[in-house]
Image (spheres, rainbow, N blue to C red):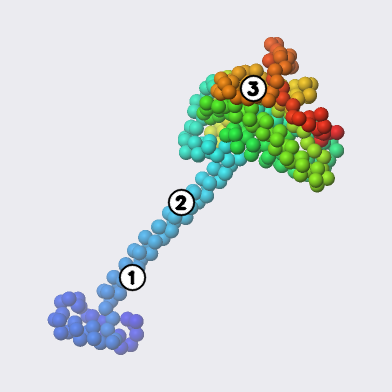
Amino acid sequence: MISHPGTVIPATNLYSLPMTERLNLYLNPNFVDTFAQATNVLVVLIIGAIMALIVYRSRHLSEDYVKAERARANLARHFSPNVVDQLATDDEPFGPVRRQDIAVLFADIVGFTHYSEDHPAEAVFELLRQFHRRMEQVVFDHHGTVDNYIGDCIMATFGVPQASHDDATRAIQCAEAMVAALEDWNVQRVSRGYPPLDVRIGAQYGAVVIGAVGSERNLSFAVVGDTVNVASRLQSLCRELQANICFGSRLIEAAKAESPTTQLKARDHGPVSIRGRDEPVHVWVEHRAENQGAIAVSA
């Protein structure tokens, strides 16, 4: 506009001119106030820079939020929702390595090895996914923590990261709910022409050492101790005792201490020797009503 022929621009500072001359210039349609236009450009640049900064920070905040939600979703795959909040907000949610009384549970598909030999890898993998998805949901419903997946076996803990007043009771209820959930799933499987599944569960209560292991880049939570070993052996003992669930007596005693009025479906089986342990373990067993007709995947 300034370079256009006929354009009138002030030769000096407008505010040094008399009011009449300034008025005549402003009324001239060919007049361009370069100072005002430069001011407008500067204001636009400042506002644009502020907006660019706001957008930049907003994008980074959005990215951080997405990363946080992704991390939260990853945590939710292993921990119950009531634990995820603590893990997502605390810098050291598990605290230092310590000894703590918790309940440990192992659940395993009966005859899975034979099933794997007789079916394609894709079918085996899909079976594992569905089994783990259903069992972990039962664990989360009882406010437990999925500690690990070991093939077709799922390991869960109750009382991690913080002990509760009913850890043993919830572990027992979770084991029974797992059997019930599998029965409901078997109804669907049979209706679709698939063989029903059977599950063995072992659980014990006692002291373990818990804490984070690994490097700063890749930390994992570990639960170590005789209680874990006993729970795993009890799960294997189900085959020998023809039981669906084997509870250690310490778990039963802890559940009774938590609620003396608790009604238990399990029955006292007495001491049993287990592999890898010198002292026998007092075992309680539980059978489902139709256990005699249950068919394992290896049938």
Q: Nearer the viewer, residue 205 or 89?
A: 205
Q: Which residue is mark 1?
A: 41
Q: Is residue 40 left or right of residue 125?
A: left
Q: Is residue 81 left or right of residue 113?
A: left
Q: Nearer the viewer, residue 180 or 37?
A: 180
Give yes or no for contact between labels 1 and 2 (Cβ–Cβ under 8 Å): no
| Label disc, if present, on residue 204 of the rendered structure | 3
What is the x, y in percent for residue 177?
67, 34
N-terminal of the two: label 3 or label 1?
Answer: 1
- Disc 3 from disc 1: Cα separation: 75 Å
Front of the two marks 1 and 2: 2
Front of the two marks 3 and 2: 3
Q: Which residue is mark 2?
A: 61
Q: Secondary structure at mark 1?
A: helix
Question: Which amino acid is tagged 3?
Answer: Gln
| Res. 11 image quadrant | bottom left
